[in-house]
């Protein structure tokens, strides 16, 4: 990237402040209230060559920026970005994998323990004075001991979760679109088959048309009355009405959820369910990891404009070449 020429980078809506500061130092930055094609003035359209975003970027917004070369998306999941349309237009799309893998895997294990051993409820019991007034917290009916764990989505994060589960001495199986080379865990060709073979299901699946509400009543029934379901992937992969019903009628034992279909709104049936542990999408939410994600957003921009080679292109855009 030339020191005399600074490409214009558009930041629609909120973006991690660390990324904003680096973009300000390295590029010409323009802020926009939101990623809305109607807000793109002609002079803006004539200048913008890159977008850095942690919001949805649709086809209309992409089309409104004729000189756009790259969309650097903040987060490993990029389902809110129309990457296929971008790639067809010759626009590179990047995300931020790897740097959040270990943090999200840690959160998955914490959520699993919270769900199985009721640790948040036990802490509330102590803080409210009930330990003094009523005695010991009741024994939990569930434990990790003797459990069989299934992982839905054996990508980077799924593998990191599996390594942690191995340390607990528990058997692991998985379902993925296809068998993963070099992975010795038991493979199931269908999610239903996986659910029937385990009693603990951890979902790390991305949001795609194929995974929409794929965790449904049949999958939960296969998991069984001792079943624990943990979702650290995407909320859209779960039929939340079916999950709430399964928790209420004993189809499964409990659920730990960090993601929801319509965030930040969580169905009331899940909020009031006593056998849930719920988190506000904090899987990667540490200062350390979010700073690393912000750095990768900017590093993708720098690499693209300097060398025409992004660091972490999404699969749909790997063939896009800098013009």
Image (cartoon, rainbow, N blue to C red):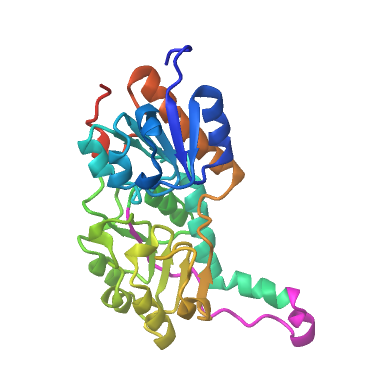
Q: Quadrant of the C terminus?
A: top left
Of 129 and 260, which appears nearest the observer? 260
Taking 16 as reference, is 131 above or below it? below
Left or right of 252, for residue 82: left
**Looking at this view, is 227 or 43 the one in front?**
43
For image coordinates 49% across by 24% down, the residue present is 27
The answer to whether residue 72 is above or below residue 201 is: above
Left or right: where does residue 279 sit relative to residue 211? right
- Image vertical order of residue 9 relative to residue 263, above or below: above
**Which residue range is magenta in the image?**
127-153
Q: Nearer the viewer, residue 189 or 23?
A: 23
Residue located at (39% from left, 27% from top): 47
Total marks placed? 0
Instruction: Examine the structure image and report whether residue 7 is included in the region drawn in magenta.
Output: no
Residue drawn at (23%, 42%), measured in percent from left and top? 85
Q: Where is residue 136 in the image (x, y as percent from the top left)?
A: 71, 81
Quadrant the N terminus occupies: top left
Most frequent secondary structure within the magenta stretch = loop
Residue 263 x/y as whole percent: 46, 63
**Residue 241 picture quarter:** bottom left
Q: Is residue 161 above or below residue 223?
A: above
Q: Nearer the viewer, residue 231 or 74?
A: 74
Quick check: can you spot residue 213?
Answer: yes
The residue that appears at 50% across and 30% down in the rendered structure is 29
Residue 98 in view (yes/no): no
Residue 134 falls inside the magenta stretch: yes
């Amino acid at each position: 990237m030339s020191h005399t020429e600074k490409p214009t980078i558009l930041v629609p809506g909120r973006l991690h402040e660390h990324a904003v500061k680096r973009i300000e130092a390295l590029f010409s930055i323009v802020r926009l209230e939101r990623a809305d094609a109607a807000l793109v003035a002609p002079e803006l359209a004539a200048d913008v060559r890159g977008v850095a975003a942690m919001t949805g970027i649709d086809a209309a917004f992409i089309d409104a920026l004729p000189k756009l070369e790259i969309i650097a998306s903040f987060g490993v999941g990029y389902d809110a970005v129309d990457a296929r349309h971008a790639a067809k237009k010759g626009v590179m799309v990047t995300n931020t994998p790897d740097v959040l893998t270990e943090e999200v895997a840690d959160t998955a294990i914490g959520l699993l323990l919270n769900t199985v051993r009721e640790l948040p409820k036990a802490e509330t019991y102590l803080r409210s004075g009930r330990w003094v007034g009523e005695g010991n917290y009741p024994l939990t009916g569930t434990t990790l001991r003797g459990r069989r764990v299934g992982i839905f989505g054996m990508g980077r994060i799924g593998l990191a979760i599996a390594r942690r589960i191995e340390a607990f001495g528990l058997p692991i199986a998985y379902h993925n679109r296809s068998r993963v080379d070099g992975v010795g865990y038991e493979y199931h060709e269908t999610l239903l088959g996986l659910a029937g073979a385990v009693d603990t299901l951890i979902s790390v699946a991305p949001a795609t048309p194929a995974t929409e509400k794929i965790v449904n009543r049949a999958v939960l029934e296969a998991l069984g009355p001792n079943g624990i379901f943990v979702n650290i992937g995407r909320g859209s992969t779960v039929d939340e009405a079916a999950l709430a019903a399964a928790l209420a009628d004993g189809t499964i034992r409990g659920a730990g959820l960090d993601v929801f279909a319509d965030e930040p709104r969580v169905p009331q049936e899940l909020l009031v369910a006593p056998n849930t542990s719920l988190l506000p999408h904090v899987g990667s939410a540490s200062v350390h990891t979010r700073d690393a994600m912000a750095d990768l957003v900017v590093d993708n921009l720098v690499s693209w404009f300097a060398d025409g080679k992004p660091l972490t292109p999404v699969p749909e855009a790997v063939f896009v070449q800098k013009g």
